Every structure is written in C-alpha cells, then in structure tokens.
Amino acid sequence: RFFHIANILMIALGVNACGQSVDCQFSDRSGSYLVSFTLLSGNCGEIPSTLVNLNHDGSEPTPPDGCSYETHTWSGDQCELQTVQTCIVESDNTSSKTTAITEQNDSFGDKITGTMSMEIRDHDDDSLKCTGTYETLYERQ
C-alpha cells in the first residue's frame, strides 16, 4: 500500500514560496526527488520516504494502475499544483482518495513542500479504514 501511495504522491507536485520571489516554471521540476512524509494527523500511520521521477513539462504523469485523476490543476503562474486522485487497489481490496497541494520553495525547484490528505476505504462496503494528513517534502537528488 505504501508504494502505491508514493506513486500517487509523485503526481502531486507544484510550486510557490512564502515571502520570497520565486520564478515558477515547469522545467524547474524535473528529475529524481526523495519524498519524505511527516504524519500530522490521522490513523493511516507513517509513510516511508521514496524516490520519484518528475516530468519537466508539468504534464499529468501516467497514474499508477487502478488510479485516475479527478483534478490536476496548476495555478496560472505555475506556482501551485492541486491534485485529487482516486484509486482502487485490488491487491488489498481498498479504494483511496488523495488530495494534495504542493509549492516550490526556490527558483531552481530543488525543494518542494506541501500537504497531502488521504482516505482509505474498503472497496466492497465503503467502510473507512483510515485517514491521514501529511506534510510532504521533495528534495532533488
């Protein structure tokens, strides 16, 4: 399940910075990033850090098997990305909904931060298995 969530997260990258001028361009965010997650609330537990690859053009990456985008929306200045993705994970008979907002912290795209919230449900009866809200940190490798 954690690998599947990590794949979802690579879709959730964007850019913006607090209190400083950042030139936001899709091409800044390409290559390999180490993504770490800090649990802020919920009962889904910790998510291990993972390595993800990002497209340089801001395009919607191919979602993991069983997943689709409800939204993949960039701000007009390319400084923020909001995504909502739903998945059905047949291997553990669950469905998930992940909402993420990410922001770039420098003009080079070396560090990207954000938040991600998710719900995991039993796919058959839609009963809630867990929820979680995480702070995310993407660091270019």
Image (cartoon, rainbow, N blue to C red):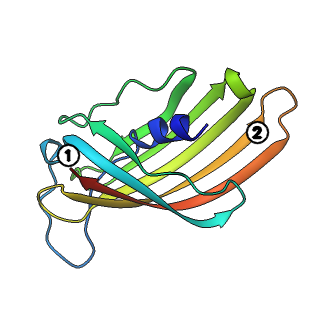
Give the position of the N terminus as an image quadrant: top right
Q: Is residue 125 left or right of residue 46?
A: right
Q: Residue at x 39, y 39 (%)?
A: 11
Pick the front one: 8 or 16: 8
Classify 3 as above or below 21: above
Q: Which mark is residue 72?
A: none
Going 60% across and 30% down the picture, which residue do you hit?
Answer: 87
Label for residue 29? Answer: 1
User: Residue 41: which quarter of the image?
Assistant: bottom right
Q: Residues within 10 Å of mark 1 (few under 14, many from 20)?
A: many
Dot 1: element: loop
21 sits left or right of 54 in the view = left
- Residue drawn at x 27%, y 74% is 18
Instruction: Identify the secondary structure beneath mark 2.
Output: strand
Up the image or down, 129 lies above or below 122; here it is below
Residue type for callout 2: Arg
Does residue 105 appear to the left or right of 63 in the view shown? left
**Which residue is label 2 attached to?**
121
Relative image position of residue 93 (x, y in whole percent): 75, 26
Place of residue 54 in the rendered image (x, y in percent of width and height, measured from the top left): 27, 37
Q: Earlier in the sequence, mark 2 or mark 1?
A: 1
